[in-house]
Image: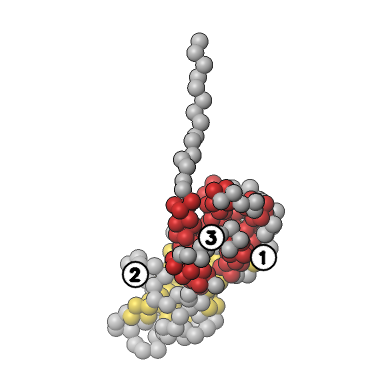
């Protein structure tokens, strides 16, 4: 009886130059994501026929068509509502920062560097939180590398203190919402990270995850990511500073 051959997954070799370009691409992507998540909601669409002083500006959380709704009119400084798109964006941000590790591991091997990227990552709790958030999103469970079993709070806090009278509608089954405001001022928002027991771990997920990126930045020079003779690397280093 013939022995079955084992299928071994072979990893194609990559040149240092190609890997460096991949790392540059990931770094630029992380910077773009961070910039996007730090911006307040600032898209508004004027609805014709509604008197001035009444909620007549639709908040464009996304590009979906407006629903014809009759909502509750209130004046509140903070509005707490779920927003799955924002949650997905924050989780994608954490995933990008965590998965940068894989390319840095390959890079250090190509450069024969003594730095142990895996060990380095384990020493930073922010990176371990990113790992748990990314793995839970991808696999539905976390390895709990951080020991906190973290997750993002579904309800997001929107600062509507400068938006006057609000009119909002929320469909709890589909988690869809419509929000109209009388004053079209940008709306800051905040996403919270919770521990597994439901208590708060970090009140601003974007800043917390950004600190994990800052930790990666500490070693980029040490492992020769920014070549002194490269104009691209100099611009990227300036962008990250």
Disc 3: which residue: 225
Disc 2: which residue: 66
Mark 2: few, some, or many residues within 10 Å (few <14, many ≥20)?
some
Badge 1 or badge 2: first in the primary sequence: 2
Residue at 45% in and 59% down: 25
Residue at 46% in and 46% down: 14
Of residues 195 and 12, the one nearer the viewer is 12
Q: Quadrant of the C terminus?
A: bottom right
Seen from this angle, which residue lies furthest top? 1
Disc 1: which residue: 200
* Location of residue 121 in the rendering, given as x and y in whole percent from the top left corner: 64, 55
* Location of residue 206 in the rendering, given as x and y in whole percent from the top left corner: 56, 68
Q: CA distance from mark 3 to mark 1?
A: 36 Å
Whether residue 213 is visible here, answered yes or no, is yes
Name the disc covering residue 9, or none: none
Q: Nearer the viewer, mark 1 or mark 2?
A: 1
Residue at 42% in and 77% down: 42
Q: CA distance from mark 3 to mark 2?
A: 46 Å
């Amino acid at each position: 009886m013939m022995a079955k051959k084992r299928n071994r997954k072979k990893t194609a070799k990559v040149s240092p130059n190609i890997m460096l370009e991949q790392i540059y691409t990931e770094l630029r992507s992380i910077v773009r994501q961070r910039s996007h998540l730090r911006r307040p909601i600032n898209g508004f669409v004027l609805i014709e026929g509604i008197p001035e002083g009444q909620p007549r500006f639709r908040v464009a959380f996304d590009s979906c068509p407006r629903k014809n709704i009759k909502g509750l009119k209130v004046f509140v400084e903070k509005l707490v509502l779920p927003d799955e798109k924002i949650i997905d964006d924050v989780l994608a941000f954490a995933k990008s920062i965590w998965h940068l590790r894989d390319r840095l591991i390959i890079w250090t091997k190509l450069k024969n560097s003594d730095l142990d990227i895996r060990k380095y990552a384990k020493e930073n709790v922010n990176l371990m939180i990113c790992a748990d958030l990314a793995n839970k999103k991808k696999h539905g469970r976390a390895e709990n590398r951080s020991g906190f079993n973290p997750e993002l709070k579904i309800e997001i806090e929107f600062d509507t203190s400068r938006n006057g009278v609000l009119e909002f509608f929320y469909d709890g089954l589909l988690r869809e919402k419509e929000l109209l405001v009388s004053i079209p001022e940008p709306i800051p928002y905040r996403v919270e990270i919770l521990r597994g027991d439901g208590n708060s771990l970090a009140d601003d997920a974007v800043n917390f995850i950004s600190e994990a990126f800052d930790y990666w930045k500490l070693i980029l020079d040490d492992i020769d990511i920014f070549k002194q003779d490269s104009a691209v690397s100099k611009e990227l280093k300036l962008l990250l500073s």
